[in-house]
């Protein structure tokens, strides 16, 4: 049994705590609000994010970061990617020096254009052998309900990736290992933007042909960019790429698809953001991914178009028209 600290008591942080507990670990979950910690500890339920899900007894919650990491072998981060730097800077002096540091986050930082593992490395000074990521088709509620699912755990170090795989292998959650951290992170970030695009198509009333076209071309766009930054293209054909993309684009439980549907129905980014406490990572990440594409001179029409809609520069209907009317060419181009 390992002692695991999880920073972030939102949907995914809480659901992954259930996975860790089911795999035999002792889990301390950090929450921003003390009242949520009290509810989790007293009612055994995260009523704000996963109502109706009973949490295992081996999961406890605290608002104190020092108590969260006390004795931890592994520290897992599950906070919004755009606030992560600020958060981890406040925690860095408390982190155990030899702990494995793991990101569940799927975003690229605005401004620096760094993936979350790169932010961890920069702030903590940890080497790549101590930094891991988890990515795959992992919608939080079905995971917490213990519906069978698989994911990818990635780390540059072979022994630590095996350690991470064993840490979260439960009766209903099957992790596959990889050393392609770049591919897993960019696949996870990009799929959120494609999810927004698919949601817009759904919100406009379009059906399966349209959404399948966006998903498939989105996967090609993802692989094109990720390969340019050193990823193995085959990673994008697996759970951290295609698998995550299909789950995000197909499910009404997806925050990004739901956000996109509302854009397609005519709401503005500001209106949608004000109406929910959940974070749709693709709304911010589309700007970072567009900048990465431009830096590498990569053709990224979907990300470019989604960014324009999010910024209010075009409507969702205009976006789909613009994508369809682009010059016809060979599929591999």
Image: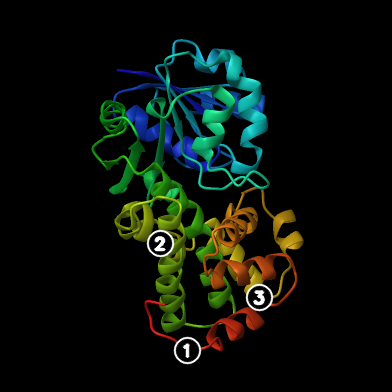
Which dot, 3 or 1, sits closer to the camera? 1
Q: Residues within 10 Å of mark 3 (few under 14, many from 20)?
A: some
- Which of these two is toward me, 247 or 176? 176
- Which of these two is toward me, 193 or 62? 193
Q: Residues within 10 Å of mark 2 (few under 14, many from 20)?
A: many
User: How many marks can you see?
Assistant: 3
Task: Give yes or no for contact between labels 2 and 3 (Cβ–Cβ under 8 Å).
Answer: no
Residue 197: quadrant of the picture: bottom right
The answer to whether residue 324 of the structure is visible from this angle is yes
Report the disc number at residue 47: none
Instruction: Measure the C-alpha gap from mark 3 to mark 1.
Output: 28 Å
Q: Residue at x 57, y 43 (%)?
A: 114
Describe the element under mark 1 as helix, strand or loop: loop
Describe the element under mark 3 as helix, strand or loop: loop
The answer to whether residue 32 of the structure is visible from this angle is no
Horizontally, residue 130 falls left or right of residue 235, namely right
Disc 2 target residue: 223
Furthest residue toward left: 171
Describe the element under mark 2 as helix, strand or loop: helix
Q: Residues within 10 Å of mark 1 (few under 14, many from 20)?
A: few
Report the disc number at residue 265: 3
Disc 1 target residue: 328
Q: Residue at x 55, y 64 (%)?
A: 297
Furthest residue toward top: 71
- Which of these two is toward me, 278 or 133? 133
Which dot, 2 or 3, sits closer to the camera? 2
Q: Which of pointers 3 and 1 lies earlier in the amino acid sequence? A: 3
Instruction: Measure the C-alpha gap from mark 1 to mark 2.
Output: 20 Å
| Rendered position, 135 above or below 70 | below
């Amino acid at each position: 049994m390992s002692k695991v600290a999880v920073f972030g008591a939102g949907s995914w942080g809480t659901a992954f705590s259930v996975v860790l507990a089911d795999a035999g670990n002792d889990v301390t979950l950090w929450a921003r609000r003390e009242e949520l910690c009290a509810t989790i500890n007293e009612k055994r339920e995260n009523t704000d994010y996963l109502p109706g899900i009973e949490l295992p007894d081996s999961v406890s919650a605290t608002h104190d970061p020092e108590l969260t990491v006390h004795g931890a072998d592994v520290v897992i981060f599950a906070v919004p990617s755009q606030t992560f730097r600020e958060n981890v800077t406040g925690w860095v002096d408390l982190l155990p020096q030899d702990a494995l540091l793991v990101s569940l986050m799927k975003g690229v930082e605005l401004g620096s254009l760094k993936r979350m593992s790169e932010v961890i490395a920069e702030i903590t000074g940890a080497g790549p052998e101590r930094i891991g990521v988890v990515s795959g088709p992992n919608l939080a509620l079905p995971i917490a309900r213990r519906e069978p699912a698989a994911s990818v755990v990635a780390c540059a170090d072979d022994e630590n990736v095996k350690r991470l795989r064993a840490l979260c292998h439960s009766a209903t959650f099957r992790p596959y290992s990889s050393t392609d951290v770049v591919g897993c992170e960019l696949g996870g970030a990009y799929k959120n933007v494609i999810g927004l695009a698919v949601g817009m198509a759904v919100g406009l009333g379009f059906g399966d042909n349209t959404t399948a076209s966006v998903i498939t071309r989105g996967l090609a766009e993802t692989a094109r960019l990720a390969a340019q930054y050193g990823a193995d293209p085959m990673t994008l054909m697996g759970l951290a790429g295609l698998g995550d993309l299909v789950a995000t684009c197909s499910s009404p439980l997806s925050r990004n698809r739901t956000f996109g549907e509302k854009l397609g129905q005519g709401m503005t980014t500001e209106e949608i953001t004000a109406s929910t406490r959940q974070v749709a990572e693709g709304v911010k990440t589309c700007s970072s991914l567009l900048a990465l594409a431009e830096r590498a001179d990569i053709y990224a029409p979907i990300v470019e178009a989604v960014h324009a809609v999010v910024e209010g520069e075009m409507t969702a209907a205009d976006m789909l028209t613009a994508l369809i009317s682009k010059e016809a060419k060979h599929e591999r181009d």
